[in-house]
Image (spheres, coloured by chain):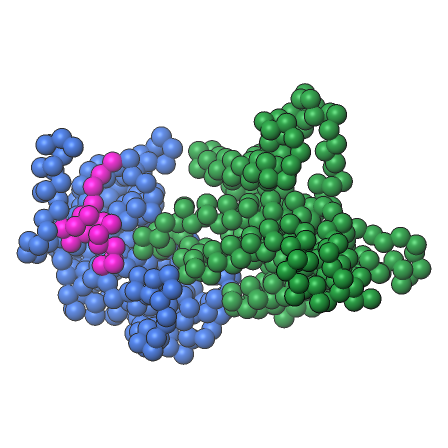
Chain colours: A green, B blue
Amino acid sequence: MGAEFVALSLPPMLIGTLAALACALPGNFLVLRRQSLVGDAISHVVLTGIVVAFLITGQIAAWPMMLGAAAAAVVAVTLIEVIQRLGRVDAGAAMGVTFTAMFAFGVLLLEQSDTSGVHLDVEHALYGNLESLIWLDAVGWSSLLDPAALAGLPHELTRMAIVFALTLAFILVLWRPLVLSTFDEDYARALGVPVRALGLGLVIVAAITAVAAFDAVGSIIVIAMFICPPAAARLMTNSLVHQVLWSLAFATLSALLGYILAGYGPLWVGLPNTVSAAGMIASVSGLILAICAVAAPRRRG
Amino acid sequence: MSPVELVARNDLYTDGGTAQSPLEIREMTVSYGDQPVVYSVDMTVRPGAMTAIIGPNGAGKSTLLKAALGIVPALSGRVAVFGRPLENARHKIAYVPQRASVDWDFPTRVSDVVMMGLFGQLGLMGRVRGLHQERVYTSLARVGMQAFADRQIGQLSGGQQQRVFLARALAQGADLYLLDEPFAGVDAATERAIINVLHALRDEGKTVVAVHHDLSTVRSYFDDVFLINRRKMGAGPIDQAFTVPALQATYGGRLAEGQVAQLALDAG
């Protein structure tokens, strides 16, 4: 039991949790800045980035694709800013225009180019491959102390842990100016806070998080975790610090409960097959939001 | 850099002369789209005085303040704060934005908002000490809001919100206070409280500039007046600049007959 759990369930549960945490953290600020759709936008443009990376390198490998996706995300985020400033339209409209246009461009590229022979799987993009991120070198809990076995951990785990640490550092170090410019942009500018650079930094951090999480767990979790845990946490408290802590708790709960329910839930109700962990994790986070909307202390309306 | 520009800079940035203007604006032009909102405006604020910026709706009053602080970009113009470039003197300025410019549903408490005024001193990671908390508390006490320190900002009335914004500015300990319509939509008690604080600041030698709407209180609240309708329409001490002809020129036909008669009466 121990050996099987450590090898098959522990890595995906950890990766799912780290991805959920890394998305929920900047999601708190995105929701307060009414930029929740940034996660959605980035998840769409990632396709374009991956196709372009394939066309340039001619191979399907993790790093070129990650870089391509990250570049596309940065281009999208910059485009959104530019359209907003030059076109004087609101953030939602600028995001809508950018991500549909870039997504469509990605689809055209995919059709016109020589990639038709290559298997770029839509299902993989949506749901990721959480269940396949297993740790073959593990023989039990003792493997956690065995350097040789640890070296065989899925790359996604290390990558997601690094990205989460980066996101955490960004939020912790820049907490004061982030809060200041989110609450009162004009006042922050008057104090000399580089508001625009800070806003751009936040979406770029979100983009890096989204791309790393997208690769590990698919875009469904990314989109859900940017919005659901922070929005549910917002309904729990009137303190921003507590809101962030609640959102991290909800993200963890969604990832763990979602993974377990996906793996064992169908068996408990007598169904023969398991369901997608990514889909179940996203569903649990949505359910938490729904419960908070009905029963949380701060619910409105 | 051309010699012409050097001369122009030198006459604006005086560096250490006596009786420097706390805020000097030269040839400021701001436009939204292709419509100029503020056109080639010069302004020299008198130190230790309370100046009202008045003019009709859409005359560019708030925009002039925001452009002076670099909150909105100016097409052209230069700004000196106590004889120094703006970027070297931001710590001397406390700005009080319009109350309606922020989301009061933001998850934070009154004391947290006032603490934002200490960002200049605390920086990114500076630890909040007893003296900072003391400063927040005394700033709130000056506007009569000390009992509200732990309240959610969403629970405040309009007048209370305005007082919290003023307390945040007080916490900065600045020398120049720039307020954007501090009396808009506040109750009478708040208006009195705010004007008392502003007069106290002036009496301490601080300089106060406020965008103001109510012409009937200009004479009793302020020392100087700055009239603007996209262009500068007049400026100076109330006795000289706040005249019926100047107001009619600034407001055009938009000033009601009764208002003009009343102001003429006050002046007489």
Residue A83, position in %: x, y? 49, 34
Image quadrant assignment for residue A4: bottom right
For the residue pair B192 and B200, the one nearer the viewer reads as B200
Residue at x 33% of width, y 68% of height? B167
Residue at far left of view: B18
Number of residue marks: 0
Q: Is residue B251 left or right of residue B1?
A: right
Residue at x 59% of width, y 36% of height? A64
- The answer to whether residue B141 is above or below residue A69 is below
Image quadrant assignment for residue B142: bottom left
Q: Is residue A287 left or right of residue A231?
A: right
Residue at far front of view: A148
Q: Is residue B87 magenta?
A: yes
Residue at x 92% of width, y 56% of height? A271
Residue B267 in view here: no
Q: Is residue B208 magenta?
A: no
- The answer to whether residue A120 is above or below residue A259 is above
Residue B29, position in %: x, y? 26, 37
Q: Quadrant of the N terminus of chain A?
A: bottom right
Residues drawn in magenta: B76-93
Residue A295 in view here: yes
- The answer to whether residue A117 is above or below residue B115 is above
Q: Quadrant of the C terminus of chain A?
A: bottom right
For the residue pair A151 and A235, the one nearer the viewer reads as A151
Q: Is residue A23 left or right of residue B148?
A: right
Residue A87, position in %: x, y? 47, 33
Image quadrant assignment for residue B90: bottom left
For the residue pair A206 and A134, the one nearer the viewer reads as A134
Residue B70, position in %: x, y? 30, 46
